[in-house]
Amino acid sequence: MHPVLTVFWKEVTENLRDRRTIMNALVRAPLLGPLLFLVIFNVQINLLLKNADKPLPVPVVGAANAPNLVTALTQEGMVPEPAPENPVIAVRRQLDKVILVIPHDYAKYWKRGETATVRLVYDSSHRSSAQPVRRLRKMLISYARMTVVQRMLARGLSPNIVLPLIPENRNLATPQSRGALLFSILPYFIVMTTFLGGMYLAIDTTSGERERQSLEPLLSNPVARWSVLAGKLAATAFFALISLALGVIGFSVAGHFMDVRKLNIVLDLGVHFFLFTLLLMFPLVLLLSCLQTLVAAFAKSFREAVTYLSLLMFVLVFPSVLLAFIPVKARLWMYAIPLLGQQLGIMRLLRGHTPGALEIVVCLLGTVLAAAASFVVTMRAYDSERLAVSA
Amino acid sequence: MIEVENLHKSFGAVKAVEGVSFVARDGEITGLVGPNGAGKTTTLRMLYTLMKPDEGQIRVDGIDAVAQPLVVRRRLGVLPDARGLYKRLSARENISYFGRLQGLDDATLLARSDSLINALDLHDVVDRRTEGFSQGERVKTAIARALVHDPKNLILDEPTNGLDVMSTRALREFLFHLRSEGRCVLFSSHIMQEVVALCDRVVVIAHGRVVADAPPQTLRERTGAENLEDAFVEIIRRSENTAA
């Protein structure tokens, strides 16, 4: 048996006996992503649905000044409520999100056919006010528009005069691409799952081995250091891969618990998604294992390694989080950048397209090159005398 | 046979080893003795090719250890100061792991481990995970692991550290047994009784230099001391005087 395989099997066997590693790599890491994803998504979906259909309670000051207006708004879904004494204070204290104020001279202007004013009191620095304000404003504008039509018809004019142009919408979004927008956070979870899956192996096989003082006897065997390193990396990558595969399966299971049809979107996390995600992620698994091993090799103890690696994870996944919120137009060269390439590829899969052969090749090549470079750097670190000496 | 010539090693400004030379012969037990921080462990680490000397030569059975570390490691059995067993593997698995890394085939591996388990009396614990092993069981397992590939030369860093009287005796018997097989045994120690009981030859190191290299009897005669401990103290004292 080649020494790489010997080291690989020993590390796998040993770590399969460690409950901490099993819990982290095979249970916590693959479960954490899908569960978080499920919770975040369901909260989001409920918010969207709740606000869209529910009656909108709005305190109205001076309702008596415009009974017709209030009746019309009520038919649109507003529920008029008695006004507080001081609207400004009520809004500041967050007792109400929005208050409608109808001035006492409203009727005077209305009857003359002049522009009447109503006032919306709200505080835009509270996020929760945005939705009710938007809905109330929409109701008011549609009431105003209806009145325009009525008044023009009464004067024998065509309402088309004030509508010289109507923008017509033709939205090309498919239910699946709309889903992708909502699930843009998914690649982040996939990378995180992979990272967590390999993390404990990377630590155990390097700083863990040093802490147990077993690295020195190990290195007294007639085996080149690169073989020892390659075996350890293979074990780390192996655990990361299993964690990744379990995680993606977890995501497709979680997908079944999401009532996505309510939003008229489609989420397809089937076999096709699974296979292509694994393909795109494979070189990234190698790269992450190398980086984790490199960082952990410099740590003096298990704890120190955990701290360093948590930091590394933050540095690595931060761009993915950013990308989930900042829209980027995908270009071919972007696929060559590790993490970014995977992110773009997975997003494309979520939108219901398979990435082109060229994109896949560029993505795989770019990440493989980065993994090879980091392997060389890690090997250099492994060759140093200081690494082996325990005390 | 291990031959060391004019070995030097520094860590930054600290000169750990400054011109150590000695020979450890086959069929002899050679003791490397010296106070803490004298450079024993660093010397041994260079011998088993964990570190490269800044200057000087090491030959194991005539092979240059700096030029051909992998070949030399095949001829060496090493018990480092840090025993470092894998806690989640059984004693047998620990031994097998190193046997495979030494390139043994399955049949040889099985035969060698069984004979070592016999010789070191490890039967009762061999299939238990090494977590929770006593100090003696740990050292025995580490020695079996170091000898699995039947090396001609053996380097042991403080082998009896932390062992009780019975285990120490058993280990001594085992080392004599290895000597009778014609192996070259080199070990470091700071316990004088042990050196007297075991060594055919004593190499005393102080401040990174060899200050004496002779059989125990000769050392006692030369210093005029009753026992080796006094001889040792006398040698160290003299070397400090000449250094100053």
Image (cartoon, grey):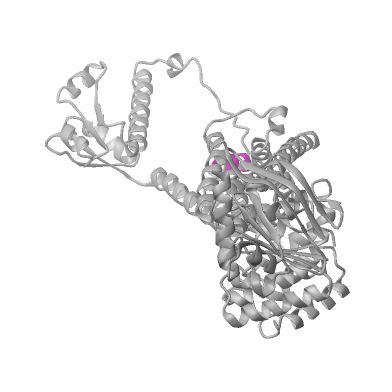
Q: Residue furthest left?
A: A85
State the count of labels.
Answer: 0
| Residue nearest the observer in this picture, A51 or B244 | B244
In the figure, residue A97 lies in which quadrant? top left
Is A100 on the left or on the right of A296, as rendered? Answer: left
| Residue nearest the observer in this picture, A284 or A167 | A284
The x, y position of residue B29, in whole percent, is: 74, 68
The x, y position of residue B5, in whole percent, is: 76, 48
The x, y position of residue A122, in whole percent, is: 26, 32
- Would you say residue A323 sits in the magenta stretch? no
The x, y position of residue A150, in whole percent, is: 35, 24
**Residue A206 in view of the camera:** no
> Which quadrant of the figure contains the C terminus of chain B?
top right
Q: Residue at x 67, y 81 (%)?
A: B170
In the figure, residue B143 lies in which quadrant? bottom right
| Residue nearest the observer in this picture, A381 or A17 | A381
| Residue nearest the observer in this picture, A127 or A295 | A295
Secondary structure mostly seen in the magenta stretch: helix
State whether residue A19 is above or below residue B123. above
Is B86 on the left or on the right of B97, as rendered? Answer: left
Is A52 on the left or on the right of A172, as rendered? Answer: left
> Which quadrant of the figure contains the N terminus of chain B?
bottom right
**Residue B131 in view of the camera:** yes
Query: Magenta stretch?
Result: A176-182
State whether residue A13 is above or below residue A97. below
